[in-house]
Amino acid sequence: MQNLIVANWKMNPVSLEEAKNIFEQIKSGTEGANAEVVICPPFVYLAELKGLTLGAQDIFYEEKGAFTGEVSGEMLKNLGVEYVIIGHSERRKYFSETDEIINEKMKKALESGLKVIFCIGETSGERDAGKKNEVLERQIKKGLAGVENLENINVAYEPVWAIGTGNNCSVEETKESIDFIKKFLALSHVEGVDTRILYGGSVKSENSGEYIKDAKANGLLVGGASLNAEEFVKIIKSAE
Ligand code: 13P
């Protein structure tokens, strides 16, 4: 199983020209790389970027119809998109996505034949209150309710306090959380499925390798640093 390195561009960059530029540089820098690389640009660029595996940053839980502004799993699949990010903390925070909504999106994504990058993670308040594992357990249980096959699921552990802050989670703490998530998944789901667990939160080339080698993450979910092609290529190489 290859490590999975995902670029979450969030709401960046502001022009297609710039998006193509970063994309092409990543493409040429990762030729022959021994890792699975996925780029998740904003929806509007998905049809324009070719030659690397694409992921969407969101999905709606209905297939089609009167849902102004939304994009369905069918649409993404028909466009050749392979992955979708679900449960990102920014969607939980700014768009009030609950575990129940996330679960609806999860089921629809799998039904549409998409692979999922399922984000979970505690806030600093929850961490300080000693509730980290409880939060992770709840997010997994509710997010994956009714999902029996984990084959197309990748879990991204993204502590909310580590996102975009430069305050990345220590390797020791990340390893503890990854071990906890692995054990919990094995307990509550079919055995034998090797679900990849990714780390995300202020990943850069100086710390990326440690998460793979020492924290035993099976990949990385990279925000800010993935918009710098040279830096992102270094991160990919560190995960080979
Ligand atoms: P940063 O890498 O910018 O901290 O963002 C992480 C993230 O939210 C990826 O989904």
Image (cartoon, helix red, strand yellow):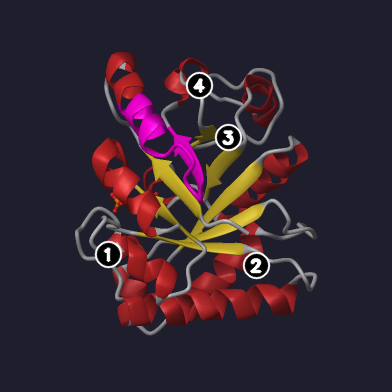
What residue does disc 2 label? 141
Question: Seen in the image, is 26 located left or right of residue 153?
Answer: left
The residue that mark 4 highlights is: 50
Q: CA distance from mark 3 to mark 2?
A: 20 Å
Between discs 4 and 3, the one toward the N terminus: 4
Q: Earlier in the sequence, mark 4 or mark 1?
A: 4
The quadrant holding residue 138 is: bottom right
Residue at the image position 26 percent from the left and 66 percent from the top: 168
Examine the rendered structure and indicate whether residue 87 appears above or below residue 26.
below
Taking the image as shown, residue 199 lies to the left or right of residue 129, namely right
Q: Secondary structure at mark 4?
A: loop
Determine crowd level at label 4: few under 14, some 14-19, many 20+ residues with C-alpha closer than 10 A: few
Residue 1 appears in the picture as rendered: yes
Report whether the residue tagged 4 is closer than 8 Å to ligand 1.
Answer: no
Q: Position of residue 142 (x, y in %)?
A: 64, 62
Q: Nearer the viewer, mark 4 or mark 3?
A: 4
The picture places residue 201, in percent across and down from the top left corner, at: 33, 59
Q: Secondary structure at mark 2?
A: helix
Q: Residue at x 62, y 35 (%)?
A: 82
Q: Which residue is mark 3?
A: 59
The disc placed on residue 88 is none
Instruction: Kindly state the secondary structure of the residue where label 1 is placed.
Output: loop
The x, y position of residue 228, in whole percent, is 25, 38
Q: Which residues are magenta?
A: 22-40
Q: Is residue 51 above or below residue 82?
A: above
Looking at the image, tell me whether mark 2 or mark 4 is earlier in sequence order: 4
Residue tagged 1: 207
What is the spatial separation of the Cα atoms under label 4 and label 3, in whole angstroms? 20 Å
Amino acid on which the number 1 mark rests in the picture: Asn
Question: What residue do we see at 58% from left, 25% from top?
Answer: 71
| Mark 3, secondary structure of its residue | loop
